[in-house]
Amino acid sequence: MNHTKRIIFHTTSMSIFILIELFMLWSLMIGRQEYTGILGFNGYLRMYGHSQFFLVSYIEKIVGTGLLAYLLMIIISVARSLVNTNLISESSSLKINKKIIAINIISLICLLIFYYIIKNPEIVVNNPRSLKAIFLTFSPIIWLVYIYSVFNLIFPIRIFINITKDNKLLLIILVFIIVFMRHSAFLDVLVNYWANLLLRPTIVLASIISNFMGLDAHVFSDTPQGIPIFGTDNFIVAIEAGCSGYEGLTLSTTLLGFYCYLQRKFLRFPQALVIIPFSGTCIFLLNSFRLVLLVAIGHYWSSDIALNGFHSVAGWLNLIATLIISILLLNSIPFFRKSSHIANCDKRRDNSQALLLPLVGLIIGSLLIRAVTADFQWLYPIPIFISIGLFIFIKGGFEFPCLTPKIFSVGIGVLVFLLWIYLIPPDHDKSLSFYHEIMSVPLWIALPWLACRIFGASIVVPVAEEFAFRGYMLPQFQILIENSLNHTKFFSFRLISIKFYSALLSLSLTSLLFGVLHSDMLAGLLAGFAYGLAYLRRRSLIDAVVAHSVTNFLLAIDVIYFGNWSYW
């Protein structure tokens, strides 16, 4: 048996053994519910118990989180360390340790006895100095001994420490992610802390800016819930913690950090990391200015547009503007870039980023018109013409092959259309509202708008989205994944080729992002996957564009003929 199979076999067999033990423990733990009702055993201890039971009430969550984190860290560490000869030599010592087995069985028996004897938490809470209460208080020690034996049985801790010397940061991040995913209360506390920390300075700066502009917006008394009231005598808004800009700060930091990682060959470090506090400052300043504009629109123009239009998109406009400025600075200032010779080595790759422009223009244009309209999007042609203009601008920098689309791509478009209307039933209330808006204007306005809507949905949107997702993102993800896998021996046994794996993974990632961009994530994800398959079949962008155009054109026919206006 080779070393890779030895590791997989040992970990899998021991994991099955541990699952059987955990099932035995769970069977006894579930029997305690009849004494505690909806609170549960641990919930009862947290609510009514003394401080001596604090650790006991959380020990099961700690054990579950620790076990999950250890399993994931083993998978990641082993995958990253297969090129390390140290792992090969260590794997030869993987064997069942009799002492660890003995510790595991003894501690398991103690826990089984513990859960069998102590079923009613009310008894130990009312008698904290009884033998049962003392045994319960010190039971976390038995849990720690048990989890220690479990860790060593699944994958010896000594070997784990040896192969994680170079992955400490990754593993720390992984543990934090697992903790926050399993215990959302921790995340809620952290989010509320930072949101409230940013809220007051944001409002203070907004007051200064408004006074400078002559608007004279100021803070009124807080609501009974402690939410500040900000505005003028004619228009006021409650500024909740979510308006502090913490979401924009988190997204800008994450996205720019990821961008710097992808561009690490061409950026200077740590100089490039200066862009992160710079972007955070921009988000903070723009968010304060956003509050001022919100009040100004409500004061001078329309409270409906301020609350239902501008307020819903201004944060995204701030984030996009900050990202664009930050990326332009990273790519144009010598302080951030390495020598021009190195940067020019990837000229083709930098040029390919222009494929994102039509979609970026479409998104920014849509957000802008949404910011100044509260109900119907009569200004829909504006982002369409912006996207067309950007396509004409970048067209000279690329040679688009004039391939004839295959009937296969048309079939994919029809299939996605059928899938779309199946997954997303029409909303009759929205359709009726849309119909009334169309019928409320003269025919000479409605017909050109409808023609532009059909043209935009069937031609412009498919071209913009396919250029971005299948023309740029999918190939770039595939290059990145292939380069990463070529430096490991994870696929040395060649069960599947690196090219196939990278294509599948990049297709899945772009499909997921495509789904996020659309209102229904599942339908968008499946549609993106289908369009990606159309592209990968011949590596031809025209196939993906045609498939997408067919879907949207059939949707337009469905909208017009059957009156399912909610699809628009």
Image (spheres, rainbow, N blue to C red):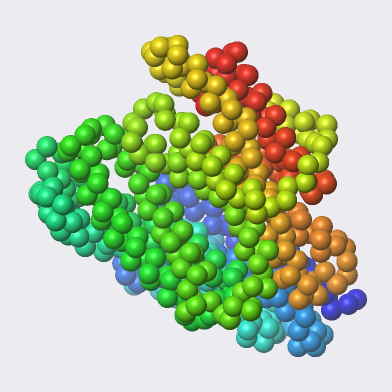
> What residue lies at 25% left-to-right and 56% top-to-bottom?
288
* Res 66 quadrant in image: bottom right
196 or 101, which is in the foreground? 196
Residue located 74% across and 70% down the image: 483
Q: Quadrant of the N terminus?
A: bottom right
Q: Residue at x 59, y 36 (%)?
A: 460
Residue 141 spot, x, y in % from top left: 50, 77
For the image, the number of numbered tags is: 0
Q: Residue furthest front?
A: 396
Name the residue rendered at 55%, 14% in the picture: 563
Furthest residue toward right: 1
Task: Tell which of 189 and 10 is nearer to you.
Answer: 189
Query: Could you tell me residue 112's position as x and y percent?
Result: 58, 65
Question: Is residue 28 something that shows in the picture?
Answer: yes
**Residue 241 on image: x %, y %:** 28, 53
Looking at the image, residue 283 sits to the left or right of residue 201; the answer is: right
Q: Is residue 357 above or below residue 254?
A: above
Residue 444 falls in image quadrant? top left
- Vertical order, 166 against 408 (above or below): below
Could you tell me residue 482's position as x and y percent?
75, 66
Q: Is residue 69 above or below residue 30?
A: below
- Using the image, determine if residue 235 lies above or below residue 132: above
Locate residue 160: give its quadrant: bottom right
Q: Work out whether residue 65 can be spotted.
A: no
